[in-house]
Image: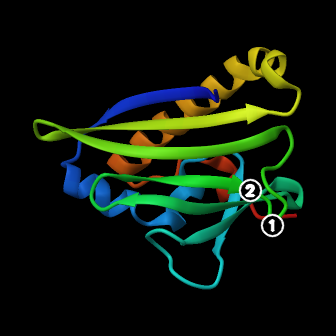
């Protein structure tokens, strides 16, 4: 059974407004800490099969491919490094975004499902860190979606 890190926040946006932003997979560097950019792989840029490479400081990267897409509601990204499967320390990992209307606002729930190399002990050791990462992404996403201001200082700094 995979471990799960989950966090949800209430967006001061209608579900349609939130979906218009969420469906744009190029926006992640504006709210995911540590990302310096994003580039789509050839093919679709939304829907099942869309795939992107996100870049981090120091030239590191991660590939994310859409494996499930519910129009207007959310999607699931498989985290991988090219055709080599999930990057270390993951045995497998996915990240999902789901929208749910709450009156004139929208609740977004972010969830990372993962299993680690090293098994359950590693999941216990790293679980709190993954929970903190998912919480920070959710809070940054809320601030970015509501204000339009980038929440990621790494994106604003020129690459070395």
- In this rendering, does residue 33 appear at all? no
Q: How is the image coloured?
A: rainbow
Q: Is residue 51 left or right of residue 146?
A: right
Residue sitting nearer the eye, 7 or 33? 7
- The residue lying at 80 percent from left, 66 percent from top is 83
User: Which residue does the numbered mark 2 point to in the structure image?
Assistant: 80
- How many residues crowd around disc 1 within 10 Å: few (fewer than 14), some, or many (20 or more)? few
| Depicted 137 relative to depicted 50: above or below | above
Residue 101: % across, % down? 19, 40
- The residue lying at 56 percent from left, 54 percent from top is 77
C-beta proximity under 8 Å, tags 2 and 1 = yes
Place residue 10 in its image quadrant: top left
| Residue placed furthest toward the left | 103
User: Which residue does the numbered mark 1 point to in the structure image?
Assistant: 83
| Depicted 91 relative to depicted 122: above or below | below
Alpha carbon of mark 2 to alpha carbon of mark 1: how far? Answer: 7 Å
- The residue lying at 50 percent from left, 40 percent from top is 140
- The residue lying at 63 percent from left, 85 percent from top is 42
Residue 33: % across, % down? 65, 44
- SS for dot 1: loop
Q: The C terminus lies in which quarter of the figure?
A: bottom right
- SS for dot 2: strand
Identify the mark at residue 69; answer none if there is no mark.
none
- In this rendering, does residue 53 appear at all? yes
Count of numbered circles in the view: 2
Residue 134: % across, % down? 57, 33
């Amino acid at each position: 059974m995979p471990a799960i890190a989950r966090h949800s926040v209430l967006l001061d946006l209608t579900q349609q407004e939130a979906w218009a932003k969420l469906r744009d997979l190029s926006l992640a560097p504006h709210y995911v800490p540590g990302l310096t950019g994003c580039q789509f792989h050839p093919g679709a840029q939304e829907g099942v099969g869309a795939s992107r490479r996100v870049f981090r400081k120091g030239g590191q990267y991660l590939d994310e491919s859409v494996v499930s897409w519910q129009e207007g509601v959310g999607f699931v990204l498989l985290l991988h490094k090219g055709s080599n499967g999930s990057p270390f320390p993951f045995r497998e990992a996915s990240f999902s975004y789901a929208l749910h209307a709450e009156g004139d606002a929208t609740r977004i729930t972010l969830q990372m499902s993962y299993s680690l190399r090293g098994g359950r002990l590693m999941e216990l050791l790293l679980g709190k860190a993954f929970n903190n990462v998912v919480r920070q992404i959710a809070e940054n996403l809320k601030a970015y979606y509501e204000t339009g201001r980038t929440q990621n200082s790494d994106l604003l700094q020129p690459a070395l």
